[in-house]
Amino acid sequence: MRPSKKVRASKEVRPNDPASFPNRMDASIVVPKRSIPRFYGHGVPGVNLEKLPGKLIVVEGADGSGRSTQIARLVQWLEGCGHATTQVGLKRSTLVSEDLDQAQNGNILSRTTLSLFYATDFADQLENVILPALRSGFIVLADRYIYTLMVRDMVRGIDPEWLRNLYGIAVVPDAVFYLNVDPEQLVQRVFSKNQTLDYWESGMDLGLSRDMFDSFLQYQGRVRNQFKKIQATYGFTIIDGHRTMDDINAELRREIESVIAGR
Ligand SMILES: Nc1ncnc2c1ncn2[C@@H]1O[C@H](COP(=O)(O)OP(=O)(O)OP(=O)(O)O)[C@@H](O)[C@H]1O
Ligand SMILES: [Mg+2]
């Protein structure tokens, strides 16, 4: 007997369609292809790079560009495919994240000190989360990485060479995706999510404009241009973030599948 159309449709598996996600449990698990990672510079002493079988995937993008939305979906998908995952992001270290918040609320630190504070937050997560997870074969998803930190500082006039040296401790990721969204659309998303703009994400410390809305547009425009400048050096994959969440996620999955398979 021929199966009805309805039965056939429900059994159809479309690997890149989020609606098909639960069906991924019966798919075979792709064991990540080994590749030897490297550090951008001097690295972390005592780390054996040959013993880091995990993968590091970075999602970069401005405030409100959709990073959290995409990472949450990627985690669900990757874990459903049998991969262990962990997540890192800015200001998430146990060492300094609370102090960093306090310092930013008080706006009492010089630019260089603030930069070093963020670098400390990154180094703590690198040593205590990223490297151990890579050693255990996890897929690490980073919600922003050293690039946002460098770009924010470059926009504030900090020497790029000093920054490159500072972040020479970082592991080179297996892939970096930059969610590209126009400042005009970002502002809409941030408003509808938070009903307000953030002082630092609007670059108010730079004195570009007394109007926060105007400052946000100018600052995010500068950050975006700076990202474009370093794109070739760091090899970001630029993802058009203006599309639907599903379309963006489908593209990210395709790209990450290739990374895991070592293509
Ligand atoms: N592709 C998209 N199209 C339209 N709206 C989106 C899209 N992706 C995310 N959003 C919405 O934009 C807002 C910001 O998304 P999200 O929180 O994922 O961004 P983020 O980059 O993590 O922001 P933050 O910098 O605040 O952490 C949310 O309200 C989300 O629902
Ligand atoms: Mg977020």
Image (cartoon, rainbow, N blue to C red):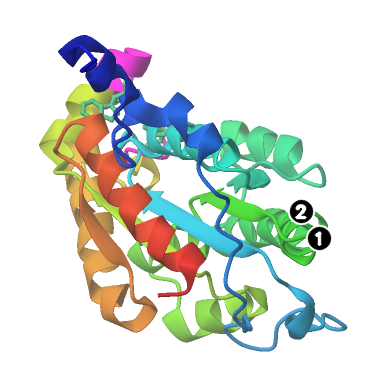
Residue 192 is inside the magenta segment: yes
Q: Residue at x 35, y 28 (%)?
A: 20
- Within 10 Å of the Cα at label 1, are there few (<14), some (14-19), or many (20+) other Cα atoms? some
Q: Secondary structure at mark 1?
A: helix
Q: Is residue 108 left or right of residue 233?
A: right
Please say if 189 is above or below 104.
above
Q: Residue at x 20, y 38 (%)?
A: 247
Dot 1 corresponds to which residue?
A: 132
Location of residue 263 in the rendering, given as x and y in whole percent from the top left corner = 40, 75
**Circles 2 and 1 in contact, beta carbons < 8 Å:** yes
User: Based on the displayed image, in which of its 4 quarters is residue 116 positioned?
Assistant: bottom right
* Ligand 1: image quarter: top left
Q: Residue 129 shows which numbered tag?
A: 2
Write the start and end of the magenta stretch as one range: 190-202
Mark 1 CB near ligand 2 (8 Å cut): no
Question: What amino acid is labelled 2 in the image?
Answer: Val
Q: Residue 38 shows which numbered tag?
A: none
Question: What amino acid is labelled 1 in the image?
Answer: Pro
- Within 10 Å of the Cα at label 2, are there few (<14), some (14-19), or many (20+) other Cα atoms? some
Front in this rendered view, residue 159 or 205:
159
